[in-house]
Image: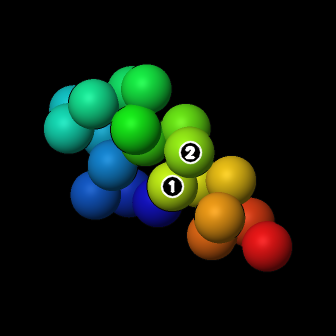
Amino acid sequence: CSMCIGVGQGIALIIERVEAL
């Protein structure tokens, strides 16, 4: 997810995992 960049890499990784599904 592009909005995750610079928001919190730890949380961003989890969000991208969910979006990947």
Q: How many numbered marks appear? A: 2
Mark 1 near mark 2, Cβ–Cβ under 8 Å? yes
In the rendering, which numbered label is found on residue 14? 2
Q: Quadrant of residue 7?
A: top left
Name the residue located 51 percent from the left edge and 55 percent from the top edge. Answer: 15
Q: Is residue 11 left or right of residue 19?
A: left
Is 13 placed above or below 2 here?
Answer: above
Q: Is residue 3 left or right of residue 2?
A: left
Q: CA distance from mark 1 to mark 2?
A: 4 Å
Residue 20 coordinates in the image, percent (x, y): 74, 66
Q: Quadrant of residue 11?
A: top left
Name the residue located 56 percent from the left edge and 45 percent from the top edge. Answer: 14
Residue 16 coordinates in the image, percent (x, y): 58, 54
Is 20 placed above or below 6 here?
Answer: below
Q: Amino acid at mark 2?
A: Ile
Circle 2 — which element? Answer: helix
Q: Is residue 1 left or right of residue 6?
A: right
In the rendering, which numbered label is found on residue 6? none
Is 10 placed above or below 5 here?
Answer: above
In the rendering, which numbered label is found on residue 15? 1
In the picture, the quarter occupied by the C terminus is: bottom right
